[in-house]
Amino acid sequence: MTDRSGPALVVTRHGGSDVLAVEDRTAPQPGPGEVLVRVAAAGVNFIDVYQREGTYPTEPPFVSGSEGAGTVVAVGPGVEAFGPGDRVAWPQHLGSAAAFTVRPVDLLVQVPEGVDLEVAAAVMLQGLTAHYLVTSTFEVTEGTTALVHAAAGGVGQLLVQLVKARGGTVVATAGGPEKGETARALGADHVIDYRAVEDLAAEVRAATGGRGVDVVYDGVGKDTFDASLDSLRPRGTLALFGAASGQVPPFDIQRLNRGGSLFLTRPTLGHHLATRDELEWRAREVLGAVADGSLHVAVGGRYPLADAARAYDDLEGRRSQGKLLLIP
């Protein structure tokens, strides 16, 4: 029998990146409705940080990682949609950062021919997030003006491209000239170095002729929240989808009124994959765009599991561009 044991990245207790440990684990047999996958790559995401820290309820010890891609090596009873050798990916299910993982078939999608498994792993969580933001949270159409924070980051790069593909105008923020050039190369119409300006909202308004933007896609959180609200036109929408700089503290909701009857939402991916049809629709559009070359996915770093702490430190320290991957 083929050996099905290998390393797994384990959160030993709640805390910083120092609580991560690599342990050798034997893969369990897949049960009904499950498949066993040999993992090619697992994504590095802020949701992993929130789970590791206990911000999102978790009970250590557990295997980290929510997103990944790999090859099916065995199927459980009753599984007909997938078989050994199939290339699959998934956006959100704990336990992905391991050599082998058992996944429910309802969470898997086929990876199209021509899409590398590492690229598939890199685009699932962030790609489907960017997709729901521009299609469902605030639908971007011809003429929409969007502010994209951290535009050189994983989600930011995808948002810039998807907004442009739907006919929108992008005002992008990034930290430093190099990251700004990345955003510009992907199609951003206006690029603001947030480190070099005193009043970010004023810069955004200047870029829009004083009008403000229709929507802000903000995955940064605490550090950008005030500027995001102040950058909106009347009846504009702030989609706060992450907290890379920390959680936004409670605030007076009358600010939404004073800002011009603004809308504020705190969406999450799980609520936008409510049905199998929705998962397949989003994955088909995102992976299809990768396959035909219209959506570029930048992998900013590949780390072995033994270097996972450094990967998460790079992510949290905002020292990276594009997507970071763990390679079991």
Image (cartoon, helix red, strand yellow):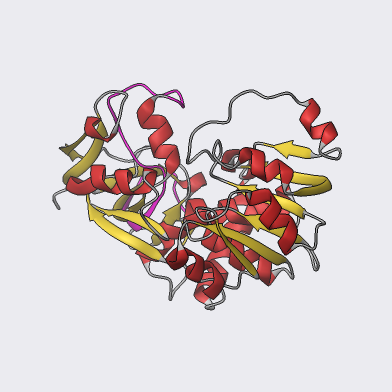
- Left or right of 289 in this view: 71: left
In this rendering, position of residue 267 left or right of residue 72: right
Q: Name which residue lies at 46% across and 66% down.
A: 177
Q: Which SS type dominates the magenta stretch? A: loop
Tell which of 223 and 50 is nearer to you: 223
Find out whether residue 168 is within the magenta segment: no
Displayed quadrant of residue 139: bottom right
Q: Is residue 62 placed above or below 132 in the rendered structure?
A: above
Instruction: Report x, y in % for residue 254.
Output: 80, 26
- Residue lying at the far front in this picture: please name it: 198
- Which of the 4 image quarters holds residue 27? top left
The residue drawn where x is 45% and y is 23% is 57
- Is residue 284 in view from this perspective? no
Name the residue rendered at 40%, 31% in the picture. Answer: 51
Tell me which segment is drawn in magenta. Answer: 55-81
Q: At 49% from the left edge and 71% from the top edge, which residue is drawn?
A: 181
The answer to whether residue 110 of the structure is visible from this angle is: yes
| Viewer-closest of 24 and 180 | 180
Q: Percent from the top left, x then y, of residue 173?
A: 57, 57
Residue 232 image offset from top left, x and y in percent: 76, 48
x, y percent for residue 293:
52, 78
Nearer the observer, 166 or 264:
264
